[in-house]
Amino acid sequence: MTYMDLKGQKLKSAEKQISVASTEDKNFALKCVAEAINSNRKEILAANEKDVQNGILSNMSEGLVDRLKLDDSRIDGIIDGINTVIKLQDPVWKSDRVWTMENGLTFSKMTVPIGVIGIIYESRPNVTVDAFALAIKSGNCILLRGSSSAINSNLALVDAIKQGLRNSNITEEVIGFVEDTDRDLVSDMLNATDYLDLIIPRGGKGLIHFVVESASVPTLQTGDGNCHLYVDESGNLEDAVNILVNAKTQRIGVCNACETLLVHENIAKEFLPMAYEALKDKVELRGDIATASIIEVKPATEEDWYEEYLDYILAIKVVKSADEAIDHINKYGTKHSESIITENLTNANKFQRQVDSSTVYVNASTRFTDGGEFGFGAEMGISTQKIHARGPVGLEQLVSNKYLIMGHGQIRK
Amino acid sequence: MTYMDLKGQKLKSAEKQISVASTEDKNFALKCVAEAINSNRKEILAANEKDVQNGILSNMSEGLVDRLKLDDSRIDGIIDGINTVIKLQDPVWKSDRVWTMENGLTFSKMTVPIGVIGIIYESRPNVTVDAFALAIKSGNCILLRGSSSAINSNLALVDAIKQGLRNSNITEEVIGFVEDTDRDLVSDMLNATDYLDLIIPRGGKGLIHFVVESASVPTLQTGDGNCHLYVDESGNLEDAVNILVNAKTQRIGVCNACETLLVHENIAKEFLPMAYEALKDKVELRGDIATASIIEVKPATEEDWYEEYLDYILAIKVVKSADEAIDHINKYGTKHSESIITENLTNANKFQRQVDSSTVYVNASTRFTDGGEFGFGAEMGISTQKIHARGPVGLEQLVSNKYLIMGHGQIRK
């Protein structure tokens, strides 16, 4: 029996229990896990310290070390996250559609858990707990594969989770963790169609593309965000500056940050200097020729239009019309989040209808694309694919459905 | 530029038009296509005759030749199919959820087309038109790859479709057809992530598994149906016999036909002879040892439990309880359709809750798993996967969604 068979069979067997568990049992299990994490702080922080030291020794960048590092307040944040999930509505065994056909058969479309969900993720150890909590609340089992740089932290967190589950009515086998950081196991996981119903990669572009290309298990592509702000000729330019500064600089390492600014040519001479003043101290600006004729920018290359910088860099292009802005976004974007600043109803409608992205804003910052800001409470990531779920993946997106049909002897004619 | 690039770019460019086309324009285009098929009968039948002759020459089985063959009444059926789709509600740009958050942002979750859908299908030429009609009505472009055995019929049908589209306001480029039967092109198609948003294989197990294993484009797995009928100890045995005969023999080559009968041990001595009488002239029975001690059957092997016969063959097993029936189904089934015959409420509930299939019946034939019987009007197949859509794939399952967010200058705090 292979390593993946061993993991997979335990999960499949736990799936039978968790898929029909009561909300009460699931919430109690989450409460037990929150308590176990709280009482395991010392062990978790010690394990995390090992990862941090290893990271520093292997010349990990400061930003990545910061993402990896846990402290008491971050552990509080992890526990708060579990408590948030406890408060969310159970998405399982709900129906928004019951109907009866002429022959008397009654149909109910019910939500059911997906089954066993695999998560492949990078650095941040809090994902271990967040993903677990969302999966369990939606009646799914979860198989986690974190990065080797966080292996000690993740093992300590999974230990605490399992400890907590042992105090609950839910089996600890609902969570599996790939302790072995052997890369071949990732490939086994991506093709474990007998055990996994869905794989969600969480991390950078490279990881996501590798998973989507290599997996035969269905995948949910998340988090690739080259987001655009288009300032239309009729836009309120003060709002546009505020929104631009917010979308570009409020947090740079996130998928809903703005990476490219598109400006209508009729207001470029007025707006670009305003944008320049607001950003110049913090942000490197790269522009096309029309932009460079108005403000000081580095020249933008074709590659810049495709780039998700996740950094203090902004690409700028002057366009002739809303149509050109829409075409640019649909060509270079990643179907994540885009915003138009306009007072023109026709252009607002056209932009929302024709831009092919998960979330399309009028007069607001792209930074709102987030499960919490949508009112979903918590999320597993932002899906940029059109299949299964698009936009923030909260509890309601972590279920499938089943049709129940009640008859009294009907046969097909 | 490769063959797939050429096809893909045309489709992507047509997607811009069809994705926002009005219901009126889409219905008019379908009407034009129906008329063109009607006026091209002679050409279509002549092309089909070539395929049929080639099939006979290459020793194609009688059943397959029959599936391949078109005649006037089958062309009428194809035209009726288009008219059915014209009458269905347009699934695009609808919302069942609009809400406003505290900061004043208003969210609308809208349905949008998926984009470009690829279909890889076997023998039956009517699929060419059915799939086209469903795709267009839901605002999607479609790339078809039929089997080489139906190439002449399919080309004639696609010609008629394009002819019809030229009389409408929808570009003929919304439909692409892989004329070249080179098998390498299938692999190019399965990995054309730049052009295709979804691939639906329609055909036998082999085709479906090949597509799911090889594709990096997301797939919708359809039609693999090892369906079960479980007769509980409290079941009405006369209803059970009627339902068994219907589910097994009304049509054998379909995915919702019954392949395995499970019988509770307490009624096996009474029920199995009834089943035997009803089926023995038409159906080969294969049973486990307990069954063989009651009626005359061939011995069933472990492989029989996995088999989708699509033939006049039925596997039979005696079980100790509803739980054993559920476990058997979840182990050997394909998550398609299963039915319990029972008067016991607890067992009915348990069966519907715990059987992990797209459609779970109480006291009815599995043959009802079908878009038409569900009231969906028409279908692209029956999905047996849990991601995106499960059960009959009608127009409502051929859409994705997009969030529209209206603000007035909101930024994230």
Image: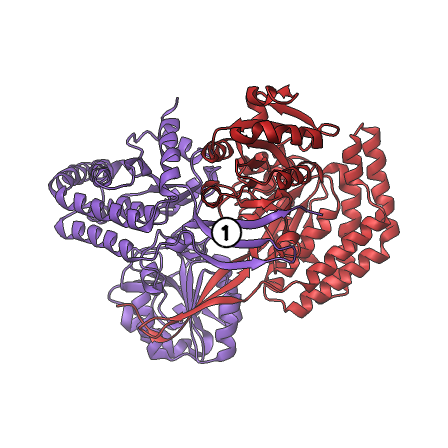
Chain colours: A red, B purple
Q: Chain of mark 1?
A: B
Residue nearest the viewer, comparing B303 with B395: B395
* x and y, in percent, of residue B377 in the image: 31, 59
The residue most toward the left is B42
* x and y, in percent, of residue B142 in the image: 35, 40
Q: Residues within 10 Å of mark 1 (few under 14, many from 20)?
A: many
* x and y, in percent, of residue B339 in the image: 41, 68
Residue at 70 percent of width and 39 percent of height: A122
Which residue, given by chain and number where applicable, does mark 1 sit on?
B387
Q: Looking at numbered disc 1 in the image, what kind of residue is underneath it?
A: Ile
Decide if residue A196 is in sight here: no
Residue nearest the viewer, comparing B56 with B102: B102
Decide if residue B33 is in sight here: yes
A297 left or right, relative to B335: right
* x and y, in percent, of residue A291 in the image: 59, 23
Q: How many marks?
A: 1
The residue most toward the front is A270
| Residue B342 in the image: above or below residue B338 | below
Q: Quadrant of residue A65?
A: top right
Q: Secondary structure at mark 1?
A: loop
Residue nearest the viewer, comparing B35 with B153: B35
Residue nearest the viewer, comparing A397 with B281: A397
Tell me the quarter of the image containing the C terminus of chain A.
bottom left
Q: Quadrant of residue B155?
A: top left
Residue at 29 percent of width and 40 percent of height: B170
